[in-house]
Amino acid sequence: MGTLLRPRPPAARVAVAAPLPVASSSAAHVAAAGGRGASSFPRRVSVAVFGPPSTQVLATRWRRRDTVVRSGVAAAAAGEPTRALSDLPVTSRVRGVCFYMVTAVAAIFLFVAMVAVHPLVLLFDRYRRRAQHYIAKIWATLTISMFYKLEVEGMENLPPNSSPAVYVANHQSFLDIYTLLTLGRCFKFISKTSIFMFPIIGWAMYLLGVIPLRRMDSRSQLDCLKRCVDLVSKGASVFFFPEGTRSKDGKLGVFKRGAFSVATKTGAPVIPITLIGTGRLMPSGMEGILNSGSVKVIIHQPIKGNDPEKLCSEARNVIADTLLRHGYGVH
């Protein structure tokens, strides 16, 4: 009787109470089989394999499951599969390539027309260059009509080509120039001198009478303003982006006073224009893509005055208020 009632060794109880967190698959097979060779593995290893997961492991599993569920709900709420998000940049890049192919082919043929009429333009319309601008309008219209819808509001606020004016607008995208050329007004843009070196496009800019500017060069800036004053005095119109560069975040930046100084010195009206949507189609710094969408141009009533600072503030406030109403930000 004494032999039958002898308790088990205490080491076995220790093995059950403290299972190892990791066990090999071979130990599990041996423990499950209960067959020969089980004595070669420690008893507590077999018990550890079948022990319950720790509280930390369970919490990690639930966090992962919750993350997956939340991600699925968010994707369903968005109404688009995850694959569509990865395909969107590819589609935009293809559209961008097609856009540049169309504009390049159209530019080649229309540039020939510009060269053909240029002698007559210099003889009879040296400053406005209406024939060149008409060709540029055809080029811009052909290009953008295949890729995005354009809506123009306030065409009645545009002065005729025979009346000089100073046009100003917010600057969001490379598409701004294409969009503005479709308005059919003979205004002279201001562009970096490096752009004039581009084949076809740069040469066409020269024929249009675009004004070159070397950035960060105060003397070039002064010469540019003098040339603008001279053109407006002779009946031509000029176009400024008072922010000086394209907005990086889509918000309206601070206006510089150069355009408004030209207006006060010549007595020409300032025509504020708000561009909406170009930055979403082709964001600044991402000129290789073209997203789908539409663009809206809002032409505001002319502003006149003798104080450049006041003109600058009024024009910016008009454009800023319009952008805010359409969900855009302002610095």
Image (spheres, rainbow, N blue to C red):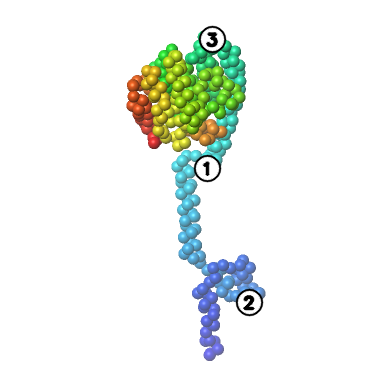
Residue 55 rendering spot, x and y as whole percentages: 47, 64
Residue 182 rendering spot, x and y as whole percentages: 49, 20
Image position of 106 (left or right of 17):
right
Name the residue furthest right.
36
- At x 55%, y 37%, the residue is 89
Above/below status of 42 relative to 103: below
Residue type at numbered disc 1: Thr
Above/below status of 320 relative to 138: below
* Quarter-of-image position of residue 166: top left
Badge 1 marks a residue whose secondary structure is helix
Residue 43 appears in view: yes
Give the residue pinned by disc 3.
123
Q: Which numbered mark, 1 or 2, is in the foreground of this view?
A: 1
Q: Nearer the viewer, residue 106 or 229?
A: 229
How much space separates mark 1 and mark 2, taking CA atoms? 53 Å
Above/below status of 265 relative to 38: above
Q: Which mark is residue 39?
A: 2
Image position of 300 (left or right of 150):
left
- Is the Cβ of the residue at disc 3 closer than 8 Å to that at disc 2? no
Q: Which numbered mark, 3 or 2, is in the foreground of this view?
A: 3
- At x 59%, y 26%, the residue is 198
Residue type at numbered disc 2: Ser
Which is nearer the N-term, disc 3 or disc 2?
Answer: 2
Give the residue pinned by disc 1.
82
Mark 1 neighbour density, 10 Å: few (under 14) some (14–19) many (20 or more): few
Mark 3 neighbour density, 10 Å: few (under 14) some (14–19) many (20 or more): few
Which is nearer the N-term, disc 1 or disc 2?
Answer: 2
Q: Nearer the viewer, residue 224 or 237?
A: 224
Residue 326 rendering spot, x and y as whole percentages: 39, 31
- Is the Cβ of the residue at disc 1 closer than 8 Å to that at disc 2? no
Badge 3 marks a residue whose secondary structure is helix
